[in-house]
Amino acid sequence: MNRNSINPFALCIFFFLQPLCAFDNTPPGFYVEWPDHNGLPTMIEIKKQLDSCTSEFQKIEIYETATFGNMLVIDDIIMLTQRDNAGYHEMIAHVPLIAHPCPKTVLIVGGGDGGTLTEVLKHSCVEEVVLCEIDHKVIDLCNTYFPEFKAAFDDPRVTVVTQDAAVYIKTKHNHFDVICVDSTDPFGPGKALFQEAFYRNIVEALTDDGIAVTQSESLFLYADLIENLYTQNRRLFPHACYYYALVPTYPSGTIGFSFCSKRHDAFAHIDLQRIKALDNVRYYNEAIHRASFQLPQFLKERLN
Ligand code: SPD
C-alpha cells in the first residue's frame, strides 16, 4: 500500500470509536465536577493531583490547579480552593458572629480544613471553639496542603473533637452562642446534617440567644432543599432566613446558608468597630452582610 494512502482498517476503527469518544468532551488537564443531581458541570484546569486517600468515610483528593491554588475534593465534590474560599468561610463565620452581640462559645460542625476555624478565631470576644469533624484524615491532609489554616488548630481556644457531629451535638445543652455547620453536600456522611432531628438538637445546644448557620447550597440548583429547610426552621426559630455568597468554583458560582436565630435578627447588632477589627478579610464587609440576605424574586416568592 502507498505510504500516503489511508489504511481502511484504521478508518473502520476511527468511525467505530469516534461516536463513543463524543461522550467525553473533557479537555485534558481539567477536573470536572458533575454530580448526578444537576446538569451543570463545574470545570477547572488542574496541573496535577498532589495527594489522595480513601478514609473510613470518604474519598479525599488534593489537586494543584492552574489558577486557583490548591483544591480539596471530597467524594468527587469540590470543597474549596485557595483562591476563592474566602467568600464561603468568611460568610459562614462572620455573619452569625457579627449578628450576635457577644459570642463567646462557638461550635463548628465539619470544617476539618480549618478555613471556618481561622475566620471564627479573628473575633477577640470568642473564648472557646469546638471543631467537631467526623474524619481526622481531612484535618491531616489540609494541614499539609492548606498551610494558611494550620495555625488555627494550635490556638489555645480550640478543641478538636473527632466524632460524628450528629451524635456529639446531643451531648450539649444551652452551651454554644454560635454554631456554624460547615458540611459537605446532603448525601454521604453529610446527609444527617440536613435533617430536622439535627436542627432540633441545634436548638437544644444553643444558648437562649444563640445563632446557627448551616451550609444550604445554591439557590439556582437547590431551591427545593432551601424551601424545605426554611419552612422547617421557621417552626424551630423566631428568626429564619437564607443568605448567600459568591464562590466561582461551587456549582452555579454561588452557595448559601440558613440563618437560624433564637433572639437576634441578622442586622440588629452590626458593630462597625468589630468588623473593622477583623484581620485580613477579603470578602466580608458591612454592606455584603446586609446585601447577602436580599434574594432574587423567584426565591423570595418561594420563601414567603
Ligand atoms: N457543593 C460543595 C459544598 C461544600 C461546602 N463545604 C465546604 C467545606 C469548606 N470548609
Image (tube, rainbow, N blue to C red):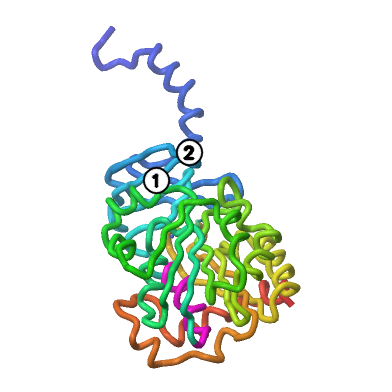
Amino acid at dot 1: Lys
Magenta segment: does it hold 172? Answer: no
Which amino acid is tagged 2?
A: Glu
Q: Would you say the magenta stretch is mainly helix, strand or loop?
A: helix
Q: Is residue 104 above or below residue 45?
A: below
**Residue 129 in picture, x, y percent from top left:** 43, 69
**In whole angstroms, how far apart are the C-alphas of marks 2 and 1?**
9 Å
Give the quarter of the image for residue 26: top left
Residues under numbered marks 2 and 1 in contact, where contact means CB atoms less than 8 Å apart: yes
Residue 95 within the magenta-colored segment of the rendering: yes
Q: Residue at x 32, y 67 (%)?
A: 155
Magenta residues span 89-101
Callout 1: few (<14), some (14-19), or many (20+) C-alpha neighbours within 10 Å?
some
Identify the disc placed on residue 137: 1
Q: On the image, numbered disc 2 is attached to which residue? A: 56
Residue 170 image position (x, y, % from top left): 62, 60
